[in-house]
């Protein structure tokens, strides 16, 4: 696990403001699912498959840690810097074919 956290000033400020521990960011970077935002950054978050990875590798201790990071997300740029960290308020959509996003009205 143990990534050296390379945080932007913005991310460090958000960690403090939102009461998120650096260990949670490390765990999220180690086990989180990655989704590309098509603007040069990646979004890390926990889904069912990453939840299973944590349970398999960390056992009962991992379940406790999942409670702390279950609804977190972080955005990382191409240089590996954490841009921002937050609590998810809505779903993160998987990469889909163009025109199939719910807000376009085309399926």
Image (cartoon, rainbow, N blue to C red):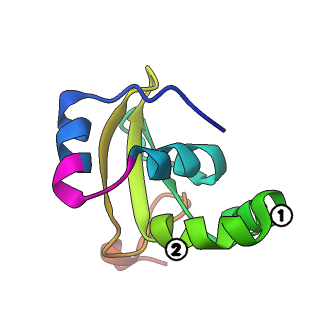
Q: Give the farthest residue toward the top.
A: 79
Residue 99 vertical position relative to residue 63 in the rendered view, above or below: above
Element assignment for label 1: helix
Is residue 93 found left or right of 61 in the rendered image?
Answer: left
Indicate which disc, 1 or 2, sits on the residue closer to the N terminus.
1
Q: Quadrant of the N terminus?
A: top right
* Residue at the far front in the pictured view: 61
Q: Residue at x 83, y 64 (%)?
A: 56
Residue 60 in picture, x, y percent from top left: 74, 72
* Quarter location, residue 90: bottom left
**Residue underneath mark 1:** 56
- Left or right, 60 with respect to 79, comes to right
Residue 19 visible in the snapshot: yes
Q: Residues within 10 Å of mark 1 (few under 14, many from 20)?
A: few
Residue 86 vertical position relative to residue 7 in the rendered view, above or below: below
Residue in the image at 44% along x and 30% along y? 5
Residue in the image at 33% along x and 30% along y:
7
Of the numbered discs in the image, which one, if any, rests on residue 67?
2
Q: Nearer the viewer, residue 61 or 71?
A: 61
Q: Quadrant of residue 30?
A: top right
Indicate yes or no whether the magenta region holds residue 17. Answer: yes
- Mark 2 surroundings within 10 Å by alpha-carbon count, few (fewer than 14), some (14 through 19), many (20 or more): few
Q: Total number of numbered labels?
A: 2
Q: Is residue 30 left or right of residue 107?
A: right
């Amino acid at each position: 696990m143990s990534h050296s956290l390379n945080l932007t000033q913005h991310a460090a400020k958000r960690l403090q403001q939102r009461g998120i521990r650096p260990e949670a960011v490390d765990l999220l970077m180690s086990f989180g699912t990655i989704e590309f935002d098509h603007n040069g950054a990646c979004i890390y978050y926990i889904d069912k498959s990453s939840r299973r990875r944590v349970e398999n590798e960390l056992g009962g201790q991992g379940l406790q840690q999942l409670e702390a990071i279950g609804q977190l997300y972080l955005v990382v740029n191409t240089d590996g810097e954490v841009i921002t960290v937050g609590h998810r308020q809505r779903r993160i959509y998987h990469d889909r074919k163009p025109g199939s996003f719910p807000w376009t009205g085309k399926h």
